[in-house]
Amino acid sequence: MVVIEGLVIDFKNVNVCHGFEMVLKDIHFSLAKAETCYIVGKSGSGKSSFLKTIYGQIKPDQGTAHVADFDLHNIKESELHKLRRKIGMIFQEFHLFEEWTVGKNLWYVLEATGWRKKEEMTKRVYEVLALVGLQGMEKRPVKFLSGGQMQQVAIARALLNYPDIIIADEPTGNLDPDTSDEILYLLNRLSREQGTTILIATHDYRLIQKFPGRIFRCQNGSLQEI
């Protein structure tokens, strides 16, 4: 484990490969605590591969790559769960168990990530639901929620393990503009109040104009700040 002072993500001269294909070359990318950053680019330009590299799903090629104090070149398979507890993932598709209640969806993640004390687990479920504005919804079946509420549950799930980083891959792609704004207000508030670093891949330039942050573009095999 290597600590990179002041930076939550730090890539230098990194290549990202998908199988034998070079997807992104010579990446220089860093984010500090509480920063918000957008990754833009056409479908197939490498956005998702870059996010998977940060998450430890794709191993970086050459250079140096550190995320949440972990060296991605040298991290062991047995340590990946420790890295991923520091990263909250939010997807365009909600990946919720719709027949389950909101609370059971969150409880399941806590169990899967090593929580064992029922009182602490219950308290944490209530805490994250309050953070996303869903107090009292823990017994509501997910199938009865609106799209915006489902995304709020997905964000609550991403917050369960006190992540240093939230990665959102097209988090508003299935939502109407008003609901999209609510989700971005929430993520911005988490950045300010919790010091969480927010990394969002999106095609929605309206959101970027409304909620400014650093912007990087994936294009022609490169990742460049614009």
Image: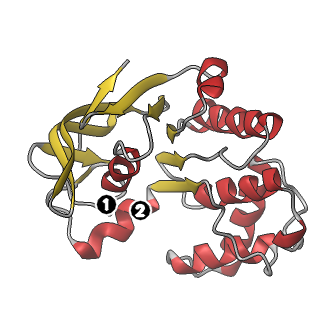
Residue ID at (67%, 33%) = 189
Specify the quadrant that holds the N terminus: bottom left
Q: Is residue 31 left or right of residue 77?
A: right
Residue found farthest to the left:
62
Up/down of 152 relative to 64, above or below:
below
Residue corresponding to mark 2: 84
Specify the quadrant that holds the C terminus: top left
* x, y percent for residue 199: 48, 39
Q: Amino acid at mark 1?
A: Gly
The disc placed on residue 156 is none
* x, y percent for residue 95: 63, 68
Q: Is residue 56 left or right of residue 215?
A: left
Single out the mark in the foreground, 2 or 1. 1
Quarter assignment of residue 220: top left
Residue corresponding to mark 1: 56
Residue at disc 2, secondary structure: helix
Up/down of 43 relative to 177, above or below:
below
Residue ID at (14%, 43%) = 64
**CA neighbours of label 1 inside 10 A, class few (<14), some (14 to 19), many (20+):** many
Q: Is residue 92 left or right of residue 10?
A: right
* x, y percent for residue 34: 49, 32
> As rendered, which of 12 and 66 lies closer to the eye?
12
